[in-house]
Image (cartoon, rainbow, N blue to C red):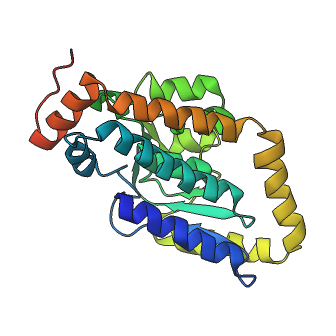
Amino acid sequence: MSREMVQQMIDALSDFHQDKSVRCVILTAKGSTFCSGVNLKEWQSQSKQRDAIEQWHRVASELRELIESMLRLPKPIIAAIDGPVLGFGLTMALACDLVVTSPKAEFEVPSSRHGLVSGLTVPLAAFRLGASFASRLVLGGQRIDAKVALALALSHREVDSDQIWAAAHEWTLKIAESSAESVQLGKRLLNEMVGESLLMNLSSGAAVLATACSTESAIEGLEAFVSKRQAKFP
């Protein structure tokens, strides 16, 4: 996910918000990976800029804006996942309302291996799945396969790879049979009332993310990633 892609998604969600003919949104991907996270090469180039700290806060703010746009979109978002989901990809999956996976789906948060902090993943994982599960992902670095994801309700339905889109689309049709106003109010109740502290926690998480990016560990981790070598943290 480059900064340009993040902005394109924000713009698309804004269009969907205004379009009354849109009743539901499916978030999916082409290729063997759902999302491998943010573009770390782009991040590494930003760490060398004179106003790096200011840039990190802008980057964190953009990522937070995307996630909040997903949560505030009055129409349900269904993630159709057929492959690995890493880092910010998991953040986006957690911001979706419903998740369909294939057996190829895997979930992992590798941020600490790059000297970074998953400031947006933590509050969403804790909100959706509980702090204990968030610890397994963020601190334990555990990779979760499709079966475990289904058992823990990270995924809501598992189908074969060739049925991913059909299963997600089937769900959209069922949603479209319901009252649009009822669905919208239900989503708002879940994300803004039941999760009343979620948006505040996302703001705090974005601030932590930006601060962590300016540390020696982050600089070393990003350089190691770009150089394809093992990081040597201070």
Q: Is residue 52 left or right of residue 144?
A: left
Point out residue 108 in the picture as x, y percentages from the top left corner: 41, 38
Point out residue 130 in the picture as x, y percentages from the top left corner: 66, 29
Q: In the image, what residue occupies the spot 21% across and 19% down?
A: 233
**Quarter-of-image position of residue 25:** bottom right
Farthest-out residue, bottom: 21
Q: In the image, what residue occupies the spot 62% across and 52% down?
A: 68
Q: In the image, what residue occupies the spot 55% across and 42% down?
A: 149
Q: Nearer the viewer, residue 119 or 112?
A: 119
Point out residue 137 in the picture as x, y percentages from the top left corner: 48, 30
| Residue 122 appears in the rendering | no
**Quarter-of-image position of residue 157:** bottom right
| Residue 150 appears in the rendering | yes
**Quarter-of-image position of residue 213:** top left
Point out residue 153 in the picture as x, y percentages from the top left corner: 65, 42
Location of the C terminus by quadrant is top left
Q: Nearer the viewer, residue 71 or 204?
A: 204
The answer to whether residue 149 is above or below residue 185 is above
